[in-house]
Image: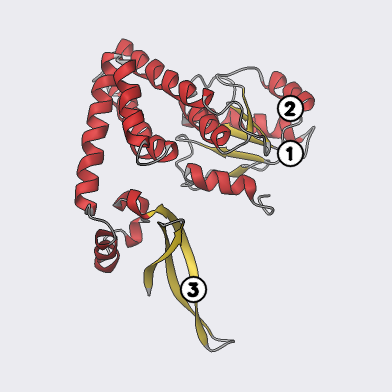
Amino acid sequence: MVYLRAKTVKGEKYLYLVKSVWDSKKNMSRQETIKYLGKASDITKDDIPADYRNDDKIISYLSSIDTVSIAEKEELLTKLKNQLFDLLIKGDYDAVRQLYDNYVSTSDSASFFEKILTPVMYRIGELWANGKLGIADEHVASNIANSLVKMINTKYTDTPTKKKVLICVPEGEEHNLGANILEAHLTNIGHRVFNLTPSIPHESVVKFIESSKPHVVFISITHEDSIKPAQRLAKKITSLSKIPIYVGGQGIKDDTIKFEDAQVIRNLSLKDIGKLLNSKNRI
């Protein structure tokens, strides 16, 4: 049986998707967490794993805990994404920033990145790749998005440091919006981030690791063509250091992709990545 478990912290409900598992040794059932869903007021169907997304009991419960139904939330998110798309194409940074400020007044940056900005940028990238959007429009949108992320990041420069994190891309990878979003979130929650994007030579990455001694390295991949260069980069890093390396990004779609010298992370939210860094057993 699958159901939602709520935990209330300072008056705010947080939800977990859990299932009952029979323990034959103890002759009793126990709860097993499938996924932490986050703040109840922010959850939409996309936050629920596909296998459970249309479960009537789960949808009914989610709709009952807030005055705003799941359908209404989905409609609102669609409107916001369409608004952001238009503003990015127009290059209206001030309006984009206002949209962000309005959103985070009732939610948070991680939710904005994952539910609004990232899907919109994927849409823009696909339109450009299919010849339905000009390169100038794509550049304007990407530059505005990067400017917004950098603005968000500057708010947290004085946050106490937990861990030193290095973010990089393999040689030839010129897209760094995903890396900038990860930088903003990790800085927000207290980590010191070295963002070496866009692409620099692998030797330079290794030298920087030797001098800065980060606790962990993230390699971001946007295109499948960057997988082999990323594998070479991970191998070069581990030949000189035992530092943990994680690889992720839009380019890691195929479940069969393996890295001998790094751990591939898929389907992790920004909050999950933050928890990964804070976990004692992250390796």
Residue at figure coordinates x 77%, y 40% from the top left: 242
**Vertical relation: 276 (above or below) 223:** below
**Percent position (x, y) of residue 114?**
40, 39
Q: Name which quarter of the figure residue 104 lies in.
A: top left
Q: Quadrant of the N terminus?
A: bottom left
What's the residue type where badge 3 is placed? Gln
User: Do labels 2 and 1 touch, CB within 8 Å?
Assistant: yes
User: Do labels 1 and 3 touch, CB within 8 Å?
Assistant: no
Q: CA distance from mark 1 to mark 3?
A: 34 Å
User: Do labels 2 and 3 touch, CB within 8 Å?
Assistant: no
Marks 1 and 3, the one that precedes in the sequence: 3
Q: Name which quarter of the figure residue 37 lies in.
A: bottom left
Marks 2 and 1, the one that precedes in the sequence: 2
**Percent position (x, y) of residue 261?**
68, 41
Q: Name which quarter of the figure residue 273 lies in.
A: top right
| Extreme residue toward the bottom, this view | 27
Q: CA distance from mark 2 to mark 3?
A: 42 Å
Reading the image, the residue beneath label 2 is 209
Reading the image, the residue beneath label 1 is 243
Residue 258 can be seen, yes or no:
no
What's the residue type where badge 1 is placed? Ile
